């Protein structure tokens, strides 16, 4: 077959891109030559080795995706919109793609709902949120990139409220409803939150922006959802660069009715990490004061200590819960993405709530995910001696599994001293120094997932317990170490970690872990949802039915697996035909 000149161009670009190492980036990288590859050219470039596509995490059949947008529940259906490039596997040509589900697990893919069509969004339809108005009408607020490259906020309404799929959206001519005013950085002014109504009947929403290096959550108010007026003082700010995708919502501490706190989450464009605080919000004065005990800025609490960004929550009226969506970017190269024909996955939707002790938010995969569980393996009270490991046998698909395990460290006295030099250092630094292969006192112990036959490829999810001073206190590190996850050496393999608030003295050394394994996704929840870490890995041998699952203990102290329940996971149904039943 004769190779078309265009194919050479694509090959050349891929070769050039292969030589560059992927790193965490401060904003979406724009590849003008790759962002609009036609399908034919993609095919010529040898599209889609689907081996590492996920089975039960949300992914469209092909192309680039990023932020979840406008998540909501309407007339019995969950709606997920997301940033999507309909033309290629790199960021660009951004529209709001759209999918619906009855259970947050199986999806019907619809046509893009919002795409450039008017002067106020001719250069792109960027992130935003949905608000269900008191009469039940959903309204979408999104950022449009206008003809002058300014970021403006637009509103859109469904064309036909009787259509539960909400397929068509109308953008009133009076858009934009919020334009960057004097003194506002028009190229950094985006991602409106879901709106809320105060006791005074006024609507409020927050937009992310920056003023030099200062990230800001700016507040707007409206009586009619059409004319929006800025509140002079920002709701909150921090010296952390551009604040993208703010989210602001109330949470109620368990068992204390009426005691409402508000959560403010921001996504930091500079580091691509997200942080949250919670505290007191007063409608009358429009002030938000985070709880004094909470760190703010780069030291703040995070939803996820791994690859998880641009997240958004919504209140699920059907199940009276708040659900969190977040985007997991790829950690391979742009050339890999073009070759695969796809990039980006949505994390498992997670129920999110304030912990009973009021110290942090908790997260857990929505229970509907368990409907995909199949074949089950159970292990109880198995001792793993220091330096030992064993394989979890009996699963058909360890590359697509859900594993719940409870470890009990048998001898906490063996814990190493927490090095005072690490005080103030972040967990990632500590874990980089004490990775999965460095022997310890109590730990590292945990799982090796997506492991190859001779364990040459493996991703470690583990805990390490340190003594903190002489008063019997402990510090517990939860870590994801992908340094041996793949033979491929051009990948970005960051170690992700956090200090998890588990009092091992009280739990008798017990630390529970749940890990969702899905080919190139390793999504872990420690301490019943006190910490989550999402990591993307790209094994070359530990793929499909060749992947294996192990429990390991590289600490001096023995560890008991008090119980382990591992499940094969069926694939979610992703239909592109709206006439097919959803489940
Ligand atoms: N992605 C969108 C922006 C947002 C960023 C553009 C966050 O609206 O700030 O695709 O990933």
Image: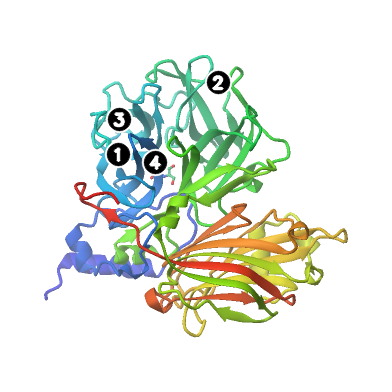
Say what secondary structure mark 4 lies in. strand
Q: How far apart are marks 2 and 3 (CA)?
A: 25 Å
Specify few, some or many for label 4: CA neighbours under 10 Å numbering under 14, 14-19, or 20 or more.
many
Question: Is mark 1 in CB contact (under 8 Å) with mark 4?
Answer: no
Q: Which residue lies furthest to the left in this view?
A: 1
Q: Name the residue under label 3.
A: 120
Residue 487's spot in the image, x, y percent?
46, 78
Say what secondary structure mark 2 lies in. loop
Residue 222's spot in the image, x, y percent?
44, 18
User: In the rendered view, does 102 fall on the left or right side of 27?
Assistant: left
Mark number, residue 232: 2
> Residue at horizontal 81%, vertical 58%?
473
Q: How far apart are marks 4 and 3 (CA)?
A: 19 Å
Q: How far apart are marks 1 and 4 (CA)?
A: 18 Å
Res 49 quadrant in image: bottom left
Q: If you read the primary sequence from the N terminus, does the residue marked by circle 2 or circle 3 appear first?
A: 3
Q: If you read the primary sequence from the N terminus, does the residue marked by circle 1 or circle 2 appear first?
A: 1
* 517 or 21: nearer the viewer: 517
Report the number of discs.
4
Between circles 4 and 3, the one closer to the viewer is 4
Q: If you read the primary sequence from the N terminus, does the residue marked by circle 2 or circle 4 appear first?
A: 4
Q: Name the residue under label 4.
A: 69
Specify few, some or many for label 2: CA neighbours under 10 Å numbering under 14, 14-19, or 20 or more.
few
> Residue at horizontal 23%, vertical 34%?
168
Q: Name the residue under label 1.
A: 123
> Residue at horizontal 30%, vertical 21%?
174
Res 343 quadrant in image: bottom left
Tell me if residue 330 comes above or below residue 170 in the rendering: below
């Amino acid at each position: 077959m004769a190779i078309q000149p265009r194919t050479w161009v694509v090959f050349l670009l891929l070769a050039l891109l292969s030589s560059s190492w992927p790193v965490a980036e401060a904003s979406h990288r724009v590849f003008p030559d790759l962002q609009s590859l036609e399908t034919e050219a993609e095919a010529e470039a040898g599209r889609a080795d689907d081996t590492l596509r996920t089975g039960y995490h949300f992914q469209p059949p092909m192309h680039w995706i990023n932020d979840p947008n406008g998540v909501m529940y309407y007339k019995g259906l969950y709606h997920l919109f997301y940033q999507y490039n309909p033309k290629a596997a790199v960021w660009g040509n951004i529209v709001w793609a759209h999918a619906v589900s009855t259970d947050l697990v199986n999806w019907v893919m619809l046509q893009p709902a919002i795409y450039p069509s008017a002067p106020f969004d001719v250069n792109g339809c960027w992130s935003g949120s949905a608000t269900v108005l008191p009469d039940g009408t959903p309204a979408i607020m999104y950022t449009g990139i206008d003809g002058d490259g300014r970021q403006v906020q637009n509103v859109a309404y469904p064309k036909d409220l009787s259509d539960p799929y909400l397929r068509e959206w109308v953008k009133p001519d009076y858009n934009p409803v919020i334009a960057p005013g004097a003194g506002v950085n028009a190229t950094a002014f985006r991602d409106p939150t879901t709106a809320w109504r105060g006791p005074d009947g006024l609507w409020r929403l927050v937009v992310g922006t920056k003023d030099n290096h200062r990230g800001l959550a700016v507040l707007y108010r409206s009586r009619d959802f059409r004319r929006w007026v800025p509140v002079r003082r920002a709701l909150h700010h921090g010296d952390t660069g551009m604040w993208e995708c703010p989210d602001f919502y109330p949470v109620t501490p368990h068992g204390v009715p009426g005691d409402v706190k508000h959560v403010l989450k921001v996504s930091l464009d500079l580091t691509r990490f997200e942080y949250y605080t919670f505290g007191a919000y007063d409608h009358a004065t429009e002030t938000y004061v985070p709880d004094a005990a909470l760190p703010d800025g780069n030291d703040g609490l995070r939803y996820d200590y791994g690859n998880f960004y641009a997240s958004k929550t919504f209140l699920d009226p059907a199940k009276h819960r708040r659900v969190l969506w977040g985007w997991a970017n790829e950690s391979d190269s742009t050339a890999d993405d073009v070759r695969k024909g796809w990039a980006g996955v949505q994390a498992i939707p997670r129920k999110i709530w304030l912990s009973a002790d009021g110290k942090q938010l908790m997260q857990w995969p929505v229970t509907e995910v368990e409907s995909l569980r199949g074949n089950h393996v159970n292990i109880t009270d198995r001792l793993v001696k220091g330096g030992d490991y064993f394989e979890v046998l009996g699963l058909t698909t360890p590359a697509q599994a859900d594993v719940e395990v409870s470890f009990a460290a048998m001898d906490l006295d063996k814990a190493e001293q927490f090095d005072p030099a690490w005080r103030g250092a972040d967990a990632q630094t500590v874990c980089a120094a004490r990775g999965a292969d460095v022997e310890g006192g109590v730990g590292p112990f945990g799982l090796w997932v997506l492991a190859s036959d001779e364990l040459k490829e493996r991703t470690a999810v583990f805990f390490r317990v340190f003594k903190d001073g002489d008063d019997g206190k402990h510090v517990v590190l939860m870590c994801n170490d992908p340094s041996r996850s793949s033979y491929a050496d051009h990948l970005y393999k960051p170690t992700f970690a956090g200090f998890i608030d588990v009092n091992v003295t009280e739990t008798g050394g017990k630390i529970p872990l749940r890990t969702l394994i899905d080919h190139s996704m390793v999504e872990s929840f420690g301490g019943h949802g006190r910490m989550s870490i999402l990591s993307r890995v790209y094994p070359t041998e530990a793929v499909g039915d060749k992947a294996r699952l192990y429990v390991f203990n590289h600490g001096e102290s023995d560890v008991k697996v008090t119980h382990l329940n591992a499940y094969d996971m069926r694939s979610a149904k992703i239909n592109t035909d709206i006439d097919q039943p959803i489940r």
